[in-house]
C-alpha cells in the first residue's frame, strides 16, 4: 500500500536503484497476442527451463515477459538487454543456443538476427534496424521494459508520478495543460482533448463518468496488453480533472489477454492505493470497471459504445446532445480513445511545451499506426505527427514486398480513402489527411501494390461497411447496398458508363445524410478511387478487363502449349481438376470447370500459365 | 435435447438488481452452454422482467452470440482489411467449400463451425485464422488444410 506521493517516489527510487545496480542480462520476450500466436509463450517457458538447467543465477540473467514490440511480422521477438540484441523469428529449437551462446558466451547467433530486406545487411542491435530508426516511441518504448502484469515495473519507469503531480494541481490547471499541449483525440476525429475535458468539467452534476474507448483492434489491443497502467493513470487524471468517480474501460470480449491485463492492473492499483478511496491522500476517490464489449466495428463509435455499456444494442444516436452533457446513463461523460488516455501521463510529467514540440503545426505529439499490407516490414509503429507517407512506407516499412510497384495506401480503416503514389509526400496529420480525401480514423495503413485492383478494393470496403452498418438510418443501410451492387456489376463485367455518375451521386447522399460518422465516411473508398484511379474503373467498364488481374469474371487462365513442359504440377494442385494432359505433354485448362483461383498460375515452374 | 437450467439460474442470481448487465449475463450463459438456449432466454425474461424481444434484439445484433449449438471446434477466419489484402477471403472461401458450410453454420457431424471476424487485431501476421482461441498467423490454403486435418485426426484419436 502506498499512502502518498513521497512513498511512491521512494518506492520508484528503490526499484530504479536496483535496476541500475543490476549487471546481468535481461531477456525481454514479447508476449503480445501476435507473438504468442507464433509461439512466444512456449519459447518463454523453454528459456526459463534452460536457465534452470544451466543453474544461472538471477544476477546473470533474468526473463522479462513484455507486451508488443511492434514488429509483429518478425515474431516471436526477443531483445537482450542491456546490449539491445534483437532476435527474431525464434523457434523452440533455438532456445538452448540462445542461453549457451549469447547469455553465457556473449556471442551473437547469426541465424536469429535481422536481415534487412532492402540493403540485405544483417543487423544485430535493435536501434540500428530501419523499422525502428525513424520511429519516435514516446508511448510504446516502455513496452519493452515492463511486464504489464506487474505494477512495480510501471512504477519503476516513473509510472504514476504524473498522477501524484496532477493531484497537487488545480483541476482547471490540468485541463489548461492538456489544451496547451494541443493533444487531439486519437480515436480518429481529432477533437481537441482539452476542450472536451473543459465541457465536461463545466457540467454541474454529482455523477459523471469517464470512459476509455479500447474498442479498436490492433493498436488498442497492443496498448491494453502491453501497458495497461499508462491508460489507467491517464483515466484517473482525467477523472480528477472533470470530477468523476467512476470509469469504464470498454474492451472487446474477443481479446482475452487485454481483459486479463487490465483486470490485473486494476486489482494491483487498488492494492497499492492508486485506485479506490482517498487516492494518494488527496481525498479523491475513483474506481474503474471493465465492460466486456463486442467486436462490431460500430461499437467503437462513441454513442454506440455507450449504448453497449448500458446493455443495449450498439446503435449510435444523433449527436445534437453531446456525451459531455448527457452520456452514459444520461450523465456527463468524458469518453476518450485509449491512446489519448495513454498520452496524458507524458504531458503532465514533461509539460505541455515539451509535448507540443513534437509533431506538426496543428497535430501535436506522436501517433501510433498499424502498417500492414504489401510492405516488407509490417507491425505497429509510433511516429511524430507530420512524418511523410514515403518515409513510413519506404524507410520504416522497408519498401514493397518482392520489389513490386506501389499502387496505393489506404489510411484510417475501412472508411478511409485510398491515396495514390503522387501523394506519397503527404504529411501524416489530421488536417493533411482530410485534405487528401481520407481520415485519421483508426490509424490503419494498408499498402496495396500493382497486383491489387482498386475497384475490387473499393468493393471490399463497401461490403465491409455494409455488413457493419447498424441499420438504423436509411442512407447508410440502403445506400451502401446500392453502391455495393453497382461495384459488383462493374467487377462482373456488367458495368455501364452511367454507373460512375451513379456512384458519385450515391456517395454524396450517403456522406451528407447519414446519422453517424460510419455512414458519413463510408463513401471515402469509392470517392478516392474514383478520383485517383478512374482509369481502372473505365477499363473494367469499357474494355471488360481487370488490369490487375483480380476480378474473376474478367480474367481467364490459359496454358501456353509452347512453354508447357508437362510437369503435371498444375494439374495436381488444381482444386477442381480442371486441368488435363499427359505427362511431358502440354496441358489444358477447361474454362467451364476452372474457378480462376490462380493456383496454377503461381505454381507453374516455367511461367506457361497466362492470365488474360 | 433438454437444457439443464440450473446454471442459468445461478447466473441470473448474480446479475439481479444490477443495471446494464444483460450483455455480460448473456456472455456468461454462452460460455457455459456454447450458445444461448431458448430455454435460458425464457427464464431470464421471466426472472429479470425483460421482454424476450429485447433479449433477442441483443442476441441477433452482436455476432458474438449464437442461438444454435456450436461445433466442437470453431474456426474463425479474419476478414479485416489487412487479412483481406493478404488473401483472407480466399481462405474463407476455401474452408467454406471444403467443409461444405457457409459462415455461421456447423458441419453435419458437429465437428466444425465456421465464422468470420471483422478484425482480430493481429494485423501484422495477416491473414489470420483462429481455431478455439488458438491463433494461426500468415495462413495460406495449404496451412489451413493441414490445420483442418490436424483437428480432425486429434478427434479421431480420442
Ligand atoms: C464507425 C466508427 C468506429 C469507431 N471506432 C473507434 C474505436 O474503435 N476506437 C476509438 O477510440 N474511437 C472510435 N471511433 C471514434 C469515437 O466515436 C470517438 O470519436 C472517440 O473514441 C473519441 O475519443 P478521442 O476524442 O480521444 O479520439 C469510431 C467512430 C466511428 C464512426
Image (cartoon, coloured by chain):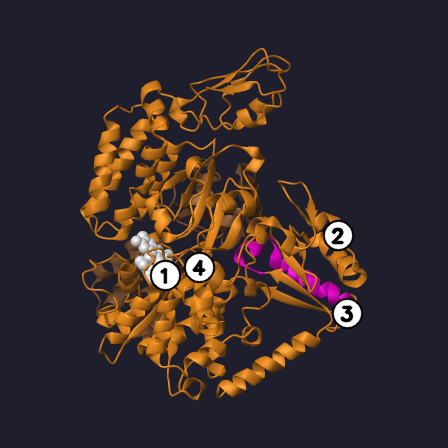
Label 4 CB less than 8 angstroms from ligand 1: yes
Q: Is mark 2 within 8 Å of ligand 1?
A: no
> Which label sits in the foreground, 3 or 1?
1
Q: Colour of chain B?
A: brown
Q: State yes or no: discs 2 and 3 in contact (Cβ < 8 Å).
A: no
Q: Chain of mark 2?
A: A
The answer for how far apart the CA atoms under marks 3 and 4 are is 37 Å
**Residue A402: x, y in percent?**
58, 34
Q: Chain of mark 3?
A: A
Q: Which residue is mark 4?
A: A220
Q: Kindly report which numbered mark, 4 or 1, lies closer to the viewer in this rendering.
A: 1
The reply, left or right, for residue A435 in relation to residue A82 is left
Residue at image coords 27%, 52%: A517
Q: Which mark is residue A184?
A: 1
Q: Residue at x 21, y 59 (%)?
A: A319
Question: Reading the chain from its start, which is encountered first: label 3 or label 4?
Answer: 3
Between the C-alphas of marks 1 and 2, the distance is 44 Å
Q: Looking at the image, do the residues carrying marks 4 and 1 touch, with CB atoms under 8 Å apart?
A: no
Foreground disc of the pair 3, 4: 4
Residue placed furthest toward the top: A562
Among the two numbered marks 1 and 2 on one chain, the one whose residue lies closer to the N terminus: 2
Of A64 and A404, which appears nearest the observer? Answer: A404
Q: Is residue A44 magenta?
A: yes
Asked whether A472 falls inside the magenta stretch, the response is no
Q: Which residue is mark 2?
A: A109
Q: Colour of chain A?
A: orange
Q: Name the residue carrying label 3.
A: A56
Which residue is located at x 22 percent, y 32 percent?
Answer: A502
Amino acid at each position: 500500500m502506498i499512502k502518498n506521493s513521497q512513498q511512491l517516489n521512494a518506492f520508484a527510487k528503490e526499484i530504479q536503484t536496483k535496476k541500475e545496480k543490476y549487471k546481468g542480462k535481461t531477456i525481454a520476450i514479447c508476449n503480445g497476442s501476435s507473438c504468442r500466436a507464433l509461439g512466444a509463450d512456449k519459447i518463454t517457458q523453454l528459456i526459463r527451463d534452460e536457465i534452470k538447467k544451466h543453474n544461472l543465477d538471477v544476477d546473470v540473467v533474468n526473463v522479462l515477459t513484455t507486451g508488443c514490440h511492434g514488429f509483429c511480422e518478425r515474431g516471436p521477438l526477443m531483445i537482450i538487454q542491456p546490449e539491445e540484441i534483437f532476435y527474431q523469428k525464434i523457434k523452440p529449437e533455438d532456445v538452448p543456443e540462445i542461453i549457451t551462446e549469447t547469455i553465457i558466451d556473449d556471442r551473437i547467433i547469426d541465424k536469429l538476427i535481422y536481415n534487412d530486406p532492402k540493403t540485405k545487411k544483417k543487423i544485430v542491435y535493435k536501434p540500428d534496424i530501419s523499422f525502428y530508426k525513424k520511429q519516435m516511441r514516446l508511448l510504446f518504448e516502455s513496452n519493452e521494459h515492463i511486464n504489464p502484469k506487474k505494477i512495480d515495473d510501471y512504477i519503476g519507469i516513473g509510472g504514476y508520478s504524473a498522477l501524484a503531480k496532477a493531484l497537487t494541481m488545480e483541476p482547471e490547471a490540468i485541463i489548461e495543460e492538456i489544451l496547451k499541449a494541443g493533444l487531439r483525440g486519437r480515436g480518429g476525429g481529432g477533437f481537441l482533448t482539452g476542450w472536451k475535458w473543459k465541457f465536461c468539467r463545466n457540467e454541474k452534476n454529482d455523477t459523471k463518468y469517464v470512459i476509455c474507448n479500447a474498442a479498436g483492434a490492433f493498436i488498442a489491443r497492443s496498448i491494453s496488453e502491453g501497458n495497461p497502467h499508462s491508460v489507467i493513470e491517464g483515466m484517473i487524471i482525467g477523472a480528477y480533472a472533470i470530477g468523476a468517480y467512476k470509469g469504464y474501460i470498454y474492451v472487446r470480449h474477443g481479446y482475452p489477454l487485454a481483459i486479463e491485463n487490465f483486470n490485473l492492473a486494476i486489482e494491483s492499483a487498488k492494492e497499492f492505493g492508486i485506485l479506490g478511496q482517498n487516492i494518494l491522500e488527496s481525498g479523491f476517490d475513483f474506481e474503474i470497471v471493465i465492460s466486456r464489449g463486442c467486436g462490431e466495428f460500430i461499437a467503437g463509435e462513441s454513442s454506440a459504445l455507450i449504448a453497449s455499456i448500458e446493455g443495449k444494442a450498439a446503435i449510435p444516436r444523433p449527436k445534437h446532445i453531446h456525451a459531455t452533457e448527457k452520456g452514459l446513463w444520461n450523465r456527463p461523460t468524458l469518453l476518450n480513445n485509449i491512446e489519448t488516455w495513454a498520452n496524458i501521463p507524458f504531458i503532465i510529467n514533461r509539460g505541455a511545451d515539451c509535448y507540443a514540440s513534437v509533431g506538426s503545426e496543428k497535430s501535436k505529439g506522436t501517433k501510433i499506426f498499424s502498417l500492414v499490407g504489401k510492405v516488407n516490414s509490417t507491425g505497429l509503429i509510433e511516429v511524430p505527427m507530420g512524418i511523410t507517407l514515403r518515409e513510413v512506407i519506404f524507410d520504416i516499412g522497408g519498401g514493397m514486398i518482392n520489389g513490386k510497384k506501389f499502387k496505393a495506401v489506404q489510411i484510417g480503416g475501412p472508411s478511409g480513402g485510398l491515396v495514390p503514389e503522387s501523394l506519397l509526400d503527404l504529411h501524416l496529420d489530421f488536417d493533411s489527411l482530410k485534405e487528401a480525401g481520407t481520415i485519421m480514423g483508426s490509424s490503419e495503413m494498408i499498402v496495396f501494390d500493382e497486383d491489387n485492383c482498386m475497384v475490387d478494393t473499393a468493393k471490399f470496403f463497401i461490403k465491409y461497411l455494409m455488413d457493419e452498418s447498424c441499420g438504423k438510418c436509411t442512407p447508410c443501410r440502403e445506400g451502401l447496398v446500392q453502391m455495393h451492387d453497382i461495384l459488383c456489376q462493374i467487377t462482373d463485367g456488367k458495368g455501364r458508363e452511367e454507373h460512375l455518375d451513379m456512384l458519385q451521386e450515391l456517395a454524396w447522399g450517403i456522406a451528407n445524410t447519414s446519422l453517424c460518422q460510419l455512414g458519413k465516411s463510408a463513401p471515402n473508398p469509392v470517392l478516392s478511387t474514383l478520383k485517383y484511379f478512374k482509369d481502372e474503373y473505365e477499363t473494367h467498364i469499357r474494355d471488360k478487363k481487370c488490369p490487375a488481374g483480380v476480378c474473376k469474371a474478367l480474367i481467364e487462365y490459359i496454358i501456353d502449349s509452347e512453354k508447357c513442359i508437362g510437369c503435371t504440377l498444375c494439374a495436381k494442385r488444381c482444386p477442381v481438376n480442371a486441368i488435363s494432359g499427359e505427362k511431358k505433354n502440354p496441358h489444358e485448362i477447361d474454362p467451364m470447370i476452372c474457378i480462376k483461383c490462380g493456383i496454377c498460375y503461381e505454381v507453374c515452374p516455367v511461367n506457361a500459365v497466362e492470365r488474360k | 435435447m433438454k437444457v439443464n437450467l440450473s446454471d442459468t439460474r445461478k447466473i441470473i442470481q448474480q446479475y439481479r438488481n444490477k443495471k446494464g448487465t444483460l450483455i455480460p449475463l448473456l456472455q456468461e450463459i454462452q460460455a457455459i452452454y456454447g450458445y444461448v438456449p431458448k430455454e435460458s432466454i425464457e427464464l431470464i425474461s421471466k426472472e429479470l422482467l425483460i421482454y424476450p424481444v429485447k433479449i433477442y434484439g441483443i442476441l441477433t445484433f452482436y455476432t458474438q452470440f449464437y442461438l444454435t449449438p456450436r461445433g466442437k471446434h470453431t474456426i474463425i477466419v479474419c476478414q479485416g482489411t489487412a487479412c483481406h489484402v493478404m488473401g483472407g477471403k480466399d481462405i474463407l472461401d476455401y474452408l467454406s467449400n471444403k467443409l461444405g458450410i457457409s459462415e455461421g453454420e456447423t458441419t453435419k457431424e458437429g465437428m466444425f463451425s465456421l465464422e468470420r471476424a471483422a478484425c482480430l487485431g493481429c494485423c501484422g501476421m495477416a491473414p489470420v485464422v483462429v481455431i478455439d482461441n488458438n491463433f494461426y498467423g500468415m495462413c495460406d490454403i495449404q496451412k489451413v488444410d493441414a490445420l483442418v486435418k490436424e483437428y480432425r485426426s486429434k478427434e479421431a484419436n480420442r
